[in-house]
Image: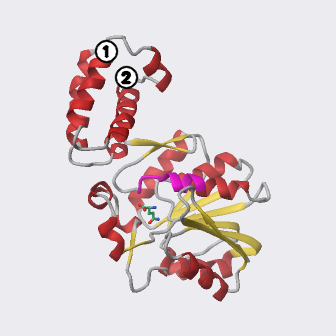
Amino acid sequence: MEATIQYIRQELSGFYPETEIKAFERLILEHVYGLSFTDQVVLRKQKLDHTCRKTISEIILRLKTYEPIQYILGETEFGGLTLNVTPSVLIPRPETEEFVEWIVATDIPENSKILDIGTGSGCIALSLKKMLPESQVSAIDISADTLLVASQNGQQNGLSVDFFQADIVHWENYTWKKYDLIVSNPPYVRESEKQAMSTNVLSYEPPGALYVPDSDPLIFYKRIAEFALHFLNDSGYLFFEINENLGNKMINLLKKYKLQQIELKKDIFGKDRMICCRK
Ligand code: GLN
């Protein structure tokens, strides 16, 4: 194993910081050889089968183009779930794990009807279903490709979520049930904020899941708030992941729609990252 680790380190040094290379080593050994992190510590001196060298060198080549490791390996971990990810879905972020933890820590009735808007890989919908097994979870996305990935993730994790295609901006065109909790992590990065983003995000992740025009950065939140006025039950919850720079604008927006008990929450980096309110 040590020779393989040495090889990965040598090849990637200069491309990524050391801590990131360590994380890659761990993920590659786990993915290619099925070695858990504990195995990787305990069996460190063991020789590894050389037939996998080609697979590893292919992974390294792709990492050198700054392709995200999650797309290369085709999967990622989110809140204890293993999820497939393809370039048609946004890679689930740690801040979204925090967001889900916050939702679950709220006193939500056990058998709530939940809707996740812009589900992507299905990360929010599936982890809510896992943590609130009595709930009925539905999830929508505008992209059919994305929904294929999300449904596959539901099947693989044995979680029953009703995934269907819909464009929330034009919600008037569809028939809806009523929900007790509506949640969304919509696109929220302003075009002007793009330059601060790294190559792996800019060149590989789906732009439709990330960016909004500077002229109307809250477009998705507005449409979802209007939708919630019609299809969220009274006292129901609305949870949003948000752009860290738009916390106050989000508070004003929710006030405008007469939504109640607005609560803004920071992520572990101290950034305004999520907001909750009730109807
Ligand atoms: N948090 C993501 C990022 O900064 C953006 C997610 C989103 O736009 N909903 O890359």
Q: Residue furthest top?
A: 46
Residue drawn at x 38%, y 57% as measured from the top left: 145
| Disc 2: which residue | 33
Quadrant of the rendering where the C terminus is positioned: bottom right
Residue drawn at x 56%, y 75% as measured from the top left: 247
Residue drawn at x 36%, y 56% as measured from the top left: 88
Quadrant of the rendering where the N terminus is positioned: top left
| 24 is higher (above) or lower (below) than 201 | above
Question: Is 42 positioned to the left or the right of 267 in the image?
Answer: left
Q: Earlier in the sequence, mark 1 or mark 2?
A: 2
Q: Residue 85 at what x, y percent from top left?
A: 40, 48
Q: Residue 254 at what x, y percent from top left?
A: 63, 81
- Disc 1 element: loop
Coloration of the structure image: secondary structure
Q: Amino acid at mark 2?
A: Tyr
Q: Is residue 92 within the magenta segment?
A: yes
Depth check: give the residue in front, 222 or 63. 63
Depth check: give the residue in front, 243 or 134. 243
Q: Residue 183's image quarter?
A: bottom right
Disc assigned to residue 9: none
| Disc 1: which residue | 48
Q: Residue 230's image quarter?
A: bottom right
Depth check: give the residue in front, 73 or 7. 7
Q: Dot 2, crowdedness within 10 Å: few (<14), some or many (≥20)? A: few
Label 1–label 2 contact, CB within 8 A: yes
Q: Amino acid at mark 1?
A: Leu
Give the Cα distance between marks 1 and 2: 8 Å
Task: Select label 1 or label 2 by which is in front.
Answer: 1
Q: Quadrant of ligand 1?
A: bottom left
Q: Is residue 208 within the magenta segment?
A: no
| 179 is higher (above) or lower (below) than 65 | below
Q: Residue 25 at what x, y percent from top left?
A: 35, 31
